[in-house]
C-alpha cells in the first residue's frame, strides 16, 4: 500500500505514528465492499445479486464505508509493522480514525516495542551471602506450633478468659438506642485474638456460661468502619458455652503422634534440620536477588509499561484486592512489579545469550527426581504437571537455576 507514515512521538519504548492512506486506495476498497454486498444482499423486487449496484451502494452506504475503512486500517497496520521492523511488546492501539470524502484516510497508531537488552556487564560483582543460624528458640517455636495444631478444646463452667473459645450471642443498640433491633447474632470467638473489639471482649469475660451482661461499649478510634469510630453503644452479651484449650504433653508420645519419630529428641532434631534447609533456601534467594540487582544497576534498560501493568493486574486478581483498594494497591505495588519484569528480562537475556535455557532432557530428569521422591511413575508425574499447566513453570525453574549457577561462577559470593 502507498501509505505515508509520520512519527509524532518517540519516548522510550513508546511510538505514536500518524498513518495516511491515499483516497484512491479507500475508494478501491469501497468498490470491492460494494460488489460483495451486491452479490449477497436481497432487495424487494430483485433476485439475489441482481439489484442495481447504485441502489445497493446507496442503501448500504454506511456499512460499505465501514467495511472499507476496517480493511484499509488493517492492511495499513500490517504495512507499518513491515516497514518499521519493530518487535511489539503488546497489541497496538488505533486512534483518531478520520476520513472525509475526497481526502486521504488518516489514523494514529500507538505502539509499545520490546526493549533491546544487551547486558554488557554481568561479571565482576561481589555480593555477601547471609549467615543464618537456627536457634533453640526457633526450634521451640516450631514445636509449639505443632502442639497448638493438636490442641483439644474442653468445655468449662468458668468465666471466659484470654485464649478461651466462646459461643456468644451479641445484640447491639442501633442509632435510636433500640437494643437488638435487627436481632441478636451468634458468634464463635477465641478471646485475645482481636476477633472482637476490646470492650466487647471485656464484657464477654465478665459473663459466666448461660448468663447475659449488658452495658455501654465504646468503639475504638481506629475501627475499620469510619462511621462507627468512637461511638458508644449499648451491647448485650449472652455466653452460650466456654471451651478451654488443652495442649498435649511435650514427650515421646507427642513425637510419635506428630510423625514417624521414636522420641522427642528425634522430632527436635528433624525440626532443626528442616529449619536449617529453609534458612539455606532463604540465603540462596537473597544471593540471587543481590546478583540480579547488581546486573540491573550496571545495565540500565527500560521496560514496557504494559508488562508492568499486566503483572499488577495479575497480582490484584490473585490476591482478590477489593475494588475500593485497587488504586492504592496499584500505586504501592507498581515498583515491585517493575522490578520483577526487569528480573525476568535479565534472566531471559542471559539464558538466551549463554545457551542456558532448559532442555527436554533436563525436564525429564527433574520429573524423574520428583517421581523418585514421591515413589511414583515419572509418566504419571509428567501427566499430572501437564494437566495442571505447570510444565512451563518447571522449565522456568530449571532455566533460572542454570542462569544463577552461571552468575555465581562469574561473580564473587562471600
Image: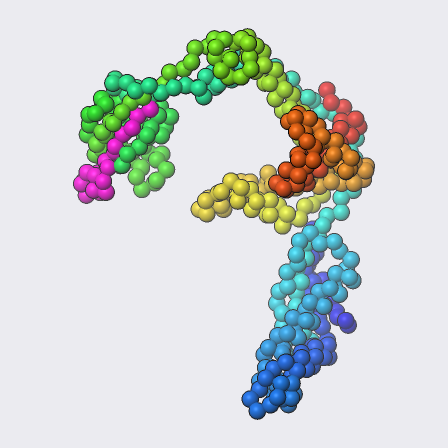
Q: Position of residue 362 (x, y in %)?
A: 76, 33
- Is residue 82 depicted above or below 345 in this figure? below
- Looking at the image, which residue is at 67% across and 79% down? 36
Closer to the camera in the image, 307 or 182: 182
Quarter that holds the C terminus: top right
Q: Residue 12 magenta-drawn?
A: no
Quarter of the N terminus within the rendering: bottom right
Q: Is residue 319 left or right of residue 72?
A: left
Q: In this picture, is 341 found above or below 12?
A: above
Q: Residue at x 77, y 38 (%)?
A: 360
- Residue farthest to the bottom, as pictured: 45
Would residue 125 be found to the left or right of residue 289 on screen? right
Task: Reply above or below: 341 against 267.
Answer: below
- At x 64% / y 27%, what residue is drawn? 374
Left or right: where 118 falls relative to 41: right
Q: Is residue 171 magenta?
A: yes
Magenta region: which residues? 165-184
Which quarter of the picture shows residue 167?
top left
Residue 342: tell me if it is visible.
no
Percent coordinates x, y for residue 26 in the rendering: 70, 77
Report the label total: 0
In the foreground, 185 or 287: 185
Picture quadrant of residue 100: bottom right
Q: Nearer the viewer, residue 342 or 28?
A: 28
Residue 273: image location, x then y, percent: 61, 15
Taken as a whole, is the magenta stretch helix, strand or loop? loop
Q: Residue at x 19, y 25 (%)?
A: 211
Amino acid at each position: 500500500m502507498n501509505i505515508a507514515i509520520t512519527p509524532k512521538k518517540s519516548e522510550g519504548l513508546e511510538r505514536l505514528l500518524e498513518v495516511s492512506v491515499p483516497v484512491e486506495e479507500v475508494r478501491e476498497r469501497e468498490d470491492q465492499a460494494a460488489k460483495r454486498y451486491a452479490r449477497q444482499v436481497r432487495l424487494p423486487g430483485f433476485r439475489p445479486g441482481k439489484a442495481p449496484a447504485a441502489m445497493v451502494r446507496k442503501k448500504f452506504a454506511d456499512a460499505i464505508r465501514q467495511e472499507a475503512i476496517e480493511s484499509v486500517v488493517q492492511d495499513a497496520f500490517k504495512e507499518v509493522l513491515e516497514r518499521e521492523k519493530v518487535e511489539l511488546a503488546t497489541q497496538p492501539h488505533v486512534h483518531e480514525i478520520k476520513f472525509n470524502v475526497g481526502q486521504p484516510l488518516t489514523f494514529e497508531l500507538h505502539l509499545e516495542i520490546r526493549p533491546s537488552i544487551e547486558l554488557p556487564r554481568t561479571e565482576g560483582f561481589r555480593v555477601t551471602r547471609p549467615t543464618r543460624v537456627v536457634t533453640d528458640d526457633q526450634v521451640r517455636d516450631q514445636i509449639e506450633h505443632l502442639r497448638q495444631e493438636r490442641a483439644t478444646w474442653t468445655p468449662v463452667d468458668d468465666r471466659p478468659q484470654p485464649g478461651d473459645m466462646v459461643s456468644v450471642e451479641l445484640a447491639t443498640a442501633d442509632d435510636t438506642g433500640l437494643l437488638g433491633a435487627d436481632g441478636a447474632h451468634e458468634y464463635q470467638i477465641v478471646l485475645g485474638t482481636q476477633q472482637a473489639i476490646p470492650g466487647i471482649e471485656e464484657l464477654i469475660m465478665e459473663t459466666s456460661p448461660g448468663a447475659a451482661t449488658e452495658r455501654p461499649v465504646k468503639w475504638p478510634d481506629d475501627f475499620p468502619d469510619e462511621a462507627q469510630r468512637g461511638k458508644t453503644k449499648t451491647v448485650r452479651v449472652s455466653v452460650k458455652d466456654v471451651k478451654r484449650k488443652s495442649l498435649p504433653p511435650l514427650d515421646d508420645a507427642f513425637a510419635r503422634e506428630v510423625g514417624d519419630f521414636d522420641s522427642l529428641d528425634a522430632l527436635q532434631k528433624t525440626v532443626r534440620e528442616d529449619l536449617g534447609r529453609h534458612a539455606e533456601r532463604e540465603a540462596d534467594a537473597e544471593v540471587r536477588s543481590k546478583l540480579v540487582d547488581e546486573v540491573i544497576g550496571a545495565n540500565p534498560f527500560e521496560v514496557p509499561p504494559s508488562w508492568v501493568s499486566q503483572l499488577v493486574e495479575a497480582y490484584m486478581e490473585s490476591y482478590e484486592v477489593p475494588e475500593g483498594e485497587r488504586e492504592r494497591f496499584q500505586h504501592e505495588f507498581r515498583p515491585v512489579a517493575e522490578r520483577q519484569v526487569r528480573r525476568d528480562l535479565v534472566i531471559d537475556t542471559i539464558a538466551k545469550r549463554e545457551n542456558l535455557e532448559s532442555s527436554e532432557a533436563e525436564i525429564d530428569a527433574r520429573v524423574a527426581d520428583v517421581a523418585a521422591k514421591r515413589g511414583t511413575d515419572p509418566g504419571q508425574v509428567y501427566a499430572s504437571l501437564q494437566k495442571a499447566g505447570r510444565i512451563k513453570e518447571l522449565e522456568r525453574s530449571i532455566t533460572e537455576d542454570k542462569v544463577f549457577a552461571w552468575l555465581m561462577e562469574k561473580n564473587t559470593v562471600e
